[in-house]
Amino acid sequence: MKLRYSIKIESPETHQALVTIEGKKRSEQTKLTFFLPRWSPGSYLIREYSRHLSNWSATNTKGEHYHFEQSDISTFTLDFSKSDVQLKEDHFIIQYRVFCHELTVRTSHIDQSHAFLHLPTLLMGVLNEKMEHPELKLEFPPLWSKVSTALEDISTKREVFLYGASDYDTLIDTPIEIGCQETDGFEIEGVKHELAHYGETIKLPASLKADVKTIVDHIQKSMGGFPYKNYLFLTHFVPGLYGGLEHGNSTALQFCPFNITTRKGYLNYLCLVSHEYFHTWNVKRLRPLELGPFNYLREATTPLLWLAEGLTSLMDELYVYRAKLASLDEYLEMQKDNLNRYLSVPGRKFHSLDQSSFNAWIKLYRPDENLNNSSVSYYLKGGIVFFFLNVLLSEKGKSIDDVLKLLWQRTLDKPEVGVTKVEVYEAIKIVGGEAILNQFEEWTETTKELDIETLLSKMGVKAEWENNSGPWLGLDVEYSQDRVLVKSVPLDGPGFKAGINAGDELLAIDGFRILKDRYAELPKYLELNQTYKITVSRLGRILDLHINLDSAPQKLKALVVTDKEKVLKVLGV
């Protein structure tokens, strides 16, 4: 089926997009069912994009209406046999409006300043129909001067913005930025890469373009060349935002412009670029079996998100280090932070990596106050277990790159079929042997604790721990002006045992008022193993509870190099 789409933005201040779909059914067809995806590949949550859809209609070329019914929350069935129209024809024109006012990498946003079009939120497909070379026309206010997208420009006229894709999956996997964004770019081996930046920034580092180019060149060489003809890095620089979503030959990024002005923040941005860019190989092409072809109307559960995101979480920082954009000390500081975050998550004791991955749709992407008590992120623990897998492989003169090469070659041999867990395990076994595979299986399939100190020592690094002898309340808090509100309560900590709940407001301890500044100073005044009366406000009632202070969980102070030659060997430098 050949479909021609158009997206028209007439009044950006209303946040509305008018979508038109034109096509022709086969003569024998009596029904067509159109659907809007309920989720986006790479973002594992049913988001119900159809909630923003309105004014759905279906007509022929004369404007006569076809009969249709909304058959499900995201589907509309056009029934030609029930349509009482005078002109009998096979052509149809679908129109509807979509409200777009949520600025994330997996939603669409339209206002006076720009339009960010995340196409799963906008473009309907047709159930059980293969779409060949769909076209998309864009119409927007004349004051907007630029369109940034990795879609193929097929327009024959400068004033017409017309784009094409090979199929529906490729079409909706390609975001679009329209407005007055800053653009730049570079070429590597004749392959063009565009940078598009939306939003106000205080000052971007002068080396940003060169550093992104360095990352791209380093990764493509390590993976054996480019798997695309062109690529777009689109970044929204907006205060408070952070995130990224990978696409076949582009990525949408969001980052706080204040954070990028610091060295640590800038490294964080480069790692985000590295992470989403490496997904060009790992996820968009080397993918778990369940992640394509897609059913956009239901969850695509897989136990292998630790491969998709965990392996990528290892490689993003490692590539930045290998490309000489971060020092060894900075890289080890990143790993220390990763390990400390892991150690602060009680849920690691109850949820394996396989379980965390399979349940991403109902846990990681639906976080609540109890998430860290019941589960562990496959990004976080996945990256750590691949980090330690690389350590074990290094002892045999191998590395994670050898595993990657095997998996990538398998993908090149069977690009239409994703990998299975058995195939991932087999690649690890071929490279590292059965003992290493058995250890890796334990890390992914069980909740047994990682022997962090021993594994670090194998790479020539010593773990130095902080002295956590001071008192700890065992609460994660946030502030509303001066008020102190409990955000979450770590499992089995003092606050948990005292019966403090997420949502409680801390009012006083032993009768002394608790406000923001005083809360931060409490460890100076309180004593370990002492019991205090803590007063909270909960659902409009004042309650007195009793809390016995304990010491905080173990936390790494530093990763100290004891054998630099070993470290460099493990890191592939």
Image (spheres, helix red, strand yellow):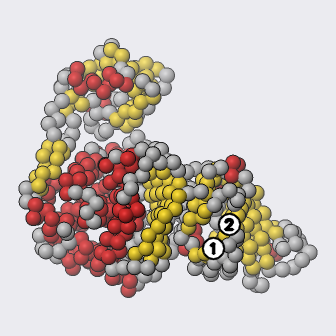
x, y percentage for residue 116? Answer: 58, 57
Rendered view: 205 above or below 153: above
Kind of residue at disc 2:
Leu
Q: Position of residue 53 (x, y in %)?
A: 68, 56
The three-letter code of the residue at mark 1 reads Tyr
Callout 2 secondary element: strand
Q: Which residue is mark 1?
A: 163
Residue 324 appears left or right of 102: left
Q: Quadrant of the N terminus?
A: bottom right
Q: Which residue is mark 2?
A: 138
Which residue is rendered at x = 29% and y = 80% of the image? 406
Given residues 200 and 304, the one toward you in this image is 200
Q: Is residue 188 visible?
A: yes
Q: Position of residue 532 (x, y in %)?
A: 26, 20
The reply to whether callout 2 and callout 1 are in contact (CB within 8 Å) is yes
| Residue at (45% x, 26% y) in the render | 481
Q: Position of residue 204 (x, y in %)?
A: 42, 52
Looking at the image, is 40 positioned above or below residue 167?
Answer: above
